[in-house]
Amino acid sequence: MRENTANAYRQHVRAFVDVLGDMPVDEVSYETATQLGDTLLRLPKSRNKKKKYCDLTVKQMLKLDIPDSDKLQGRTVSELMADWAQPEL
């Protein structure tokens, strides 16, 4: 696996755990996935890099009035969700 791919997977897993907690994969349901997608759409893009967001928890970020221009886009969230839904080969 390439290092960039591995880093992307790590970021995706971190986003999952940040939003839903560290839960067993077999407990992820349609409702859980929907909650994850809805929550990700309310979070800022590059939240771990931007100074004004990087020290905040997901719960703290959700309380902020984040401008739409700073939020993750639907396409990005869809790609994240698709990556998680892929079976491991």
Image (spheres, rainbow, N blue to C red):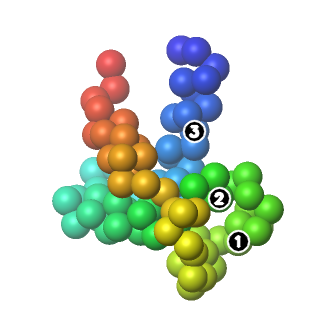
Residue where numbered disc 3 is placed: 10
Residue where numbered disc 1 is placed: 56
Give coordinates of residue 22: x percent, y percent.
Answer: 49, 58
Give coordinates of residue 67: x percent, y percent.
Answer: 56, 73
Tell me: residue 7, above or below residue 40: above
Q: Amino acid at mark 2?
A: Arg
Question: Considering the numbered disc 1 on the image, is that residue within a helix, a strand or a loop?
Answer: loop
CA–CA distance between discs 2 and 3? 15 Å
Residue where numbered disc 2 is placed: 47
Q: Is residue 64 left or right of residue 56?
A: left
Contact (Cβ within 8 Å) of mark 3 with mark 1: no
Spot the residue most to the top: 1
Q: In the image, which is nearer the foreground, mark 3 or mark 1?
A: 1
Residues packed near mark 2 inside 10 Å, few (<14), some (14 to 19) or many (20 plus): some
Residue 59: quarter of image: bottom right
Residue 38: quarter of image: bottom left
Question: Considering the numbered disc 2 on the image, is that residue within a helix, a strand or a loop?
Answer: loop
Lower position in the chain sequence, tag 3 or tag 1: 3
In the foreground, 83 or 50: 50
In the foreground, 45 or 36: 45
Spot the residue most to the front: 69
